[in-house]
Amino acid sequence: MKLPLLLLSFALVACSNDPAPSANSEQAASAAVAALQNSNSASGKTLYAACAACHGASGEGNKALGAPSLTHQQSWYLERQLLGFRAGLRGSHPDDAFGAQMQAIAKTLPDDAAVKSVVAYIDGFKAKPAAATLEGNAKRGADYYSNLCGACHGPAAEGNDKLQAPALAGIEDWYLLQQFDHFGKGIRGNNEADRYGYQMYMMGKTLPDAEVAKDVVVYIQSLAD
Ligand code: HEC
Ligand code: HEC
């Protein structure tokens, strides 16, 4: 009976890295969907009221709800992600419970013009970079980052619109690590129709292990200004 027990404990460890949405976040998701369904406003500010419960009044994010800050991503990237959720390219994998929540909300935005106006509103937020929550070997992370990530995300993780690679500096470390892990496991981006997500899915397998991925994220966090 030793083997099944061992497998079970592996499964539990795997789950504990990936917290599922809580009752609170499920409630916030239904409230946001209902608010968007009942709204006939095209104003970015009014639309954003449905987002604030999770992403914060100034886009500062909420770790307990798995919702990242939205203040350091470029607006072309935020728009493309919202369109990707709407098209089902992101948030459709059965293990992507947080992505599924966000997909349902993005699909309730009335149209692509509403996507643009909510992103324009978010673009007006000024926020401090997210605080560090992880510890690791930033020096080792820097080596891996400059060899494997910087060509697309930029030497200061400032992003590169020509390659559609978003800025990473300033976004929460826990969120970056979780997304990287999801790319590596094919939970995000494992669909060739998702052109840019698929590129990152291929990159998700290039770091040797989770410790190195954490080091890279710790280094990225140190670049935030
Ligand atoms: C119920 C909570 C909740 C609400 C309400 C919500 N979001 Fe999200 N959002 C999330 C979560 C959780 C994620 C992370 C998904 C993942 O893990 O892939 C996310 C991710 C995103 C992303 C991707 C960011 C990135 O760096 O890739 C964007 C853009 C976004 N949300 C915009 C919005 C907008 C705009 C609204 C309002 C119309 C909104 N969200 C409402 C929970 C929420
Ligand atoms: C070939 C170019 C390329 C390389 C190299 C690359 N990325 Fe990416 N990365 C992208 C693109 C494009 C996206 C946007 C994916 C999408 O649209 O879903 C992305 C997205 C991400 C995201 C998600 C950010 C968010 O807000 O959701 C993380 C985290 C990330 N990359 C980390 C890394 C790390 C760490 C490395 C190095 C190991 C790396 N990337 C190397 C192109 C690249």
Image: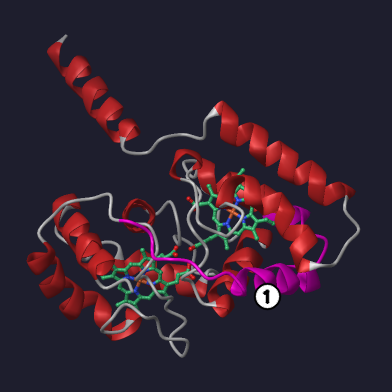
Residue sitting farthest toward the top: 1
* Residue 109 belongs to magenta span: yes
User: Residue 98: x and y, percent?
Assistant: 52, 44
Q: Is residue 106 visible?
A: yes
At a point 54% along the width and 74% down the height, the residue shown is 77
Please tell me which residue lies in front, 117 or 180.
117
Q: Ligand 1 quadrant? A: bottom right
Give the quadrant of the C terminus: bottom left
Residue 48 at x, y percent in the picture: 71, 58
Name the spot of residue 172 as percent of width and height, x first.
37, 57
Q: Nearer the viewer, residue 45 or 167?
A: 45
Q: Can I make out residue 92 in this image?
A: no
Q: Quadrant of residue 89?
A: bottom right
The residue beneath circle 1 is: 120
User: Taking 180 as reference, is 214 left or right?
Assistant: left
Is 160 placed above or below 28 here? below
Q: Is residue 119 above or below residue 67?
A: below
Residue at coordinates 46% horizontally, 34% vertically from top-left? Answer: 20
In this rendering, the answer to whether 145 lies above or below 152 is above
Mark 1, secondary structure of its residue: helix
Q: Magenta stretch: give its range.
A: 106-131
Please, which residue is most extreme toward the bottom here?
A: 162
Task: Look at the image and tell me in which quarter the N terminus lies.
Answer: top left
Q: Residues within 10 Å of mark 1 (few under 14, many from 20)?
A: some
Q: Is residue 3 magenta?
A: no
Determine whether, in the image, residue 178 is placed left or right of residue 136: right
Q: Position of residue 70 (x, y in %)?
A: 52, 63
Q: Give residue 29's quadrant in the image.
A: top right
